């Protein structure tokens, strides 16, 4: 069921081979290059100096750059200075600020209120006593009511060591609470979750490949091994990629010395390289299952492709995005950057997994990916392999046929479950999320006190009482005009908006309880606790848990 929704935004940003800090140098050598550059310069000067109206030179330049890149592949992109700051934070795995995750809660007259979702453990806000559910209503003696996301960044982020004063309204407290927070370096972790599925099965979920990803992965792996882990589910669903070197390091931990991980081939000699496992990996011989989906891209596909080609892991889920292009980043003089494709990468069997594209047709490129997903959902794996042209067929070390030409096709394809119309309303309109926030505002102090230091017990034993589900339905009726009447389960989309039946509620009552429990855990602890709660409803993970015999056979082969 698609409750684990990780929106795929910008695979062109999260690339497989990012090299930061490069500046454009003397790149032009041929006469044709110089003549073309002179033509472009002449046109620019003619427009800026002779056009009938004043021209914004900066906007004209950016438009020209973007227009040039459109004629290339879909992943060569221009990044403006403001966006570059956010990109650097994301892949440097840190920023300087007060250390909270937050949400903007709609208030009266459409004036949003800044609410703390979670203080980052050990961060500046956590240290001074900021709590989940706190509303920050003033920042440095100025109101923050009506603030937007951009203003949050501008007013709360800042250099390490500087201070910011905030005033908090805490549910259940009559008085406003003032805090002075000293900003610090805040880590952005790329590991979403790490825990034991059972006495011998570990689970690690990685959301991208940033500078710290390999170390985070190794730390998580060591922690699970101390708990007795003998086999691992490595979840890279929704992982859009990042630094190639981090992908290579993690793949190396699974593969014996000498095994090819990935090769890159470009027009220039310096863009051609190969990466082989060095040996001494921390998980080279144990059973391994890897989870991927349509949003798994780039560096994720390097790892999945290497493990599949060497018959090292069972790959489960859905066809990956299909990005086999490597970009290099070149800084421009105003802090912006060009990210230009310099090579293609190939899996150990020789596969290019880049989805085909026509230069200049980015819309068709993404539509083609959708068409592949539709085809996968109506065709068995054997049929997909049988119908593929021989030019796209490759062989793993053990002789299995795998395909190139558009993503990594899993060894076991698992289509996503479809939410009922009732659950689409509950999840899509964030009814459960809003209810849990409202309920914790009222019940928070005593409930959090009971559970705050007992996360594992909460995950294992806490059950949503029926009365709380009934309370949510009453909340949905009063706030969202969602009504439930007697009747069988709805089989068609209700014609009159949010009108459902007792049969709808009964059919999805268990799923509704899981969602509510996960939302409560997210607010009391952090988002990582969503995953162990949702496990029992995760169809891809359930399929994976039935494939350990195959994973063990692969481990023996290696």
Image (cartoon, rainbow, N blue to C red):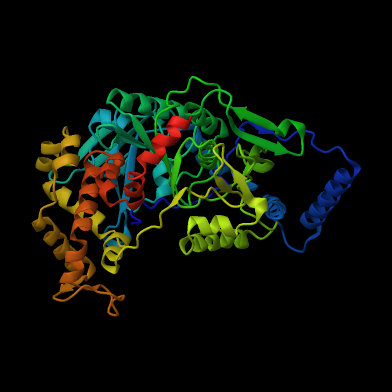
Q: Return the residue found at the far bottom.
A: 495
Instruction: Residue at 22%, 32% (x, y): give it.
Output: 129
Q: Residue at x 24, y 48 (%)?
A: 518
Left or right of residue 335, residue 203 in this image = left
For residue 510, what is the image quadrant? bottom left
Of residues 386 and 160, which is closer to you in this image?
A: 386
Q: Position of residue 214 (x, y in %)?
A: 46, 28
Give the answer, above or below, for where 208 lies relative to 52.
Answer: above
Position of residue 194 in the picture relative to residue 78 (left or right): left
Question: Is residue 206 among what the camera can see?
Answer: no
Residue extending farthest right? 31
- Residue 121 x/y as whole percent: 29, 31
Task: List x then y, in percent, for residue 461.
Answer: 14, 42
Q: Nearer the viewer, residue 171 or 540?
A: 540
From what the image shows, is residue 425 above or below residue 42?
below
Numbered-mark total: 0
View extreme (top): residue: 280
Would you place residue 467 above or below residue 81 in this image?
A: below
Residue 470 image point, x, y percent: 12, 61
| Of the pair 480 and 191, the residue shown nearer to us | 191
């Amino acid at each position: 069921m698609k409750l684990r929704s990780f929106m795929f935004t910008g695979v062109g940003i999260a690339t497989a081979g990012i090299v930061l800090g490069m500046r454009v140098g003397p790149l032009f050598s041929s006469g044709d290059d110089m003549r073309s550059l002179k033509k472009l310069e002449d046109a620019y000067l003619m427009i800026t100096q002779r056009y009938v109206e004043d021209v914004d030179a900066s906007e004209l330049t950016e438009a020209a750059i973007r227009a040039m890149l459109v004629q290339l592949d879909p992943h060569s992109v221009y990044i403006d200075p403001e966006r570059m700051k956010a990109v650097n934070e994301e892949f440097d795995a840190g920023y300087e600020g007060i250390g909270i995750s937050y949400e903007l809660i709609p208030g009266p007259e459409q004036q949003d209120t800044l609410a703390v979702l979670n203080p980052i453990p050990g961060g500046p806000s956590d240290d001074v006593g900021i709590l989940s559910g706190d509303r920050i209503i003033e920042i440095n003696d100025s109101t923050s009511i009506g603030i937007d996301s951009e203003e949050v960044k501008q007013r709360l982020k800042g250099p390490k060591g500087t201070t910011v004063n905030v005033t908090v309204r805490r549910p259940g407290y009559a008085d406003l609470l003032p805090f002075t927070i000293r900003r610090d370096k805040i880590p952005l972790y790329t590991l979403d979750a790490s825990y034991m599925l059972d006495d011998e099965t570990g689970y690690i979920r990685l959301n991208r490949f940033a500078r710290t990803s390999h170390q985070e992965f190794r730390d998580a792996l060591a922690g699970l091994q101390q708990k007795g882990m003998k086999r691992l589910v490595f979840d890279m669903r929704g992982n859009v990629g990042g630094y190639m070197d981090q992908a290579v390091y993690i793949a190396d931990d699974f593969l014996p010395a000498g095994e090819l991980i990935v090769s890159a081939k470009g027009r220039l000699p310096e863009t051609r390289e190969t990466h082989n496992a060095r040996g001494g990996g921390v998980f080279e011989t144990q059973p391994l299952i890897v989870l991927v989906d349509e949003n798994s891209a780039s560096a994720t596909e390097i790892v999945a492709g290497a493990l599949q080609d060497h018959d090292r892991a069972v790959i489960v889920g859905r066809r990956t995005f299909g990005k086999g292009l490597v970009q290099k980043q070149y800084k421009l003089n105003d802090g912006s950057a060009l990210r230009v494709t310099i090579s293609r990468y190939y899996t150990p069997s020789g596969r290019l997994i880049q989805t085909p594209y026509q230069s200049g047709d980015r819309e068709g490129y993404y539509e083609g990916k959708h068409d592949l997903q539709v085809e996968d959902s109506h065709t068995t794996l054997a049929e997909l392999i049988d119908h593929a042209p021989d030019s796209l067929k490759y062989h793993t070390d053990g002789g299995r046929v795998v395909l190139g030409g558009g993503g990594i096709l899993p060894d076991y394809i698992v289509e996503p479950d479809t939410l009922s119309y009732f659950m689409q309303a509950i999840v899509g309109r964030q009814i459960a999320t809003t209810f849990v926030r409202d309920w914790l505002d009222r019940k928070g102090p005593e409930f959090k006190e009971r559970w705050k230091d007992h996360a594992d017990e909460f995950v294992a034993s806490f059950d949503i009482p029926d009365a709380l589900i009934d309370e949510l339905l009453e909340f949905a009726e009063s706030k969202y005009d969602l009504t439930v009447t007697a009747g069988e389960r709805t089989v068609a989309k209700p014609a009159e908006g949010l009108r459902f039946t007792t049969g709808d509620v009964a059919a999805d009552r268990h799923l509704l309880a899981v969602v509510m429990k996960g939302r409560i855990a997210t607010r009391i602890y952090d988002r990582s606790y969503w995953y162990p709660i949702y496990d029992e409803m995760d169809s891809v993970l359930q399929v994976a848990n039935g494939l350990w015999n195959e994973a063990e056979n692969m481990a023996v082969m290696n």
